[in-house]
Amino acid sequence: MAKVAFIGLGNMGGPMATNLVKAGHAVKVFDLSAPACEQLAAVGASIASSAAEAASGVDYVISMLPAGKHVAGLYLGDEGLLQQLDKSTTVLDCSTIDAATAREVGEAAREAGIGFMDAPVSGGVAAAAAGTLAFMCGGEAETFPKAKAILSDMGKNIFHAGPAGAGQVAKGCNNMLLAIHMIGTCEALEMGARNGLDPKVLSEIMLASSGRNWSLEVYNPYPGVMEKAPASNDYKPGFMVDLMVKDLGLALDIAEHSDVDNRMGQLARALYSEHQSAGNGQLDFSSILRKLQG
Ligand code: NAD
């Protein structure tokens, strides 16, 4: 069993760290929020008084923070963790952040002789609690087996996407595609409904035809078609519009820096941003159907 420092115990980090404790690892935790730390202490983790204290003498440092600036603040600079860690420590940043910061931290870790992977996740709070997250890792191939060994206690599909930053690029590609096919699915269902089709029947037809996609298969956005989908529960998340807008911003940043024609992605971001500005940020992202319904 490994010694692990876990930094960032929010909606995602809390249940992920809990799963590591349950798997038998010795977990030291740190978060700026004392109640978040206490929740983990209640399941058997030990609380550190700083990130540096948590990270001393561990096999792994795992972070789950809001954005790139928090990750850069934790690892980089003279006071950053990379200057303080034992060379044998492996650093895994599971936050969803910009690819440029992930590459910068990866490069600084390489210079410091420390194994690093960006390892953003797919799957929300429920998957974090169930230990069924997917991890998309970016970093050196030789670090991947050690990363996979611990990530397997928090998820079920663990991929090596490429060098540092590649995990964030994979996540950006996936979430841009998710936004586009969710909006397309809503448009198709609404068009069918306005022409007298039952959305449930139309969903069955498209599921057996070439329009089949994940939104139709497990997350139908039309209320009443799928009992357990957020659409049938007043669009309670699920995956919030606020987070989709954040992820689309990161994806478009990647597209801009690689000179990709991604007009569909840009339109998806514009639609989701308008939906967010209209006060729907806390709803599930499948609520974009309501915007299309006007
Ligand atoms: P959250 O806001 O619930 O948690 C973030 C935690 O980080 C907070 O507890 C905060 O106190 C702590 N924190 C911030 N700065 C810190 C610092 N310097 N040191 C220690 N702790 C610090 O966010 P979340 O929903 O858990 O999301 C975390 C990351 O996971 C984000 O990058 C998000 O985009 C990504 N993500 C979230 C979901 C989801 O459904 N919530 C799904 C996939 C990916």
Image (cartoon, rainbow, N blue to C red):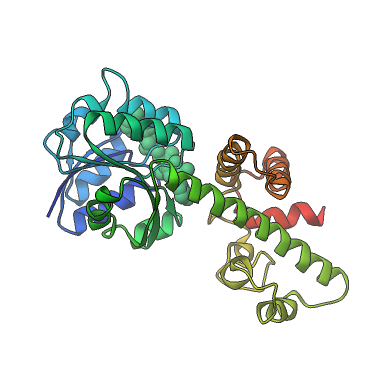
Residue 207 screen position, x and y as percent: 66, 78
Residue 132 screen position, x and y as percent: 37, 63
Write the residue at 40% across / 46% down: 11
85 lies above or below 251:
above
Choose between 282 and 110: the one closer to the eye. 110
Left or right position of 80 against 216: left
Left or right position of 237 against 163: right
Left or right position of 283 against 156: right
Write the residue at 28% across / 52% down: 144
Question: Which quarter of the rendered picture does the N terminus lie within?
Answer: bottom left
Choose between 29 and 69: the one closer to the eye. 69
281 lies above or below 231:
above
- Regarding residue 270, the answer to whether it shows in the image is yes
281 lies above or below 178:
above
Residue 110 screen position, x and y as percent: 28, 34
Dividing the image into four equal quarters, which quarter contains ligand 1? top left
Write the residue at 76% across / 68% down: 189
Pick out the residue farthest to the top. Answer: 78
Residue 252 screen position, x and y as percent: 62, 40
- Regarding residue 50, the answer to whether it shows in the image is no
The answer to which image quadrant residue 74 occupies is top left
The answer to which image quadrant residue 56 occupies is top left
Choose between 65 and 265: the one closer to the eye. 265
How many numbered dots are placed on residues in this image?
0
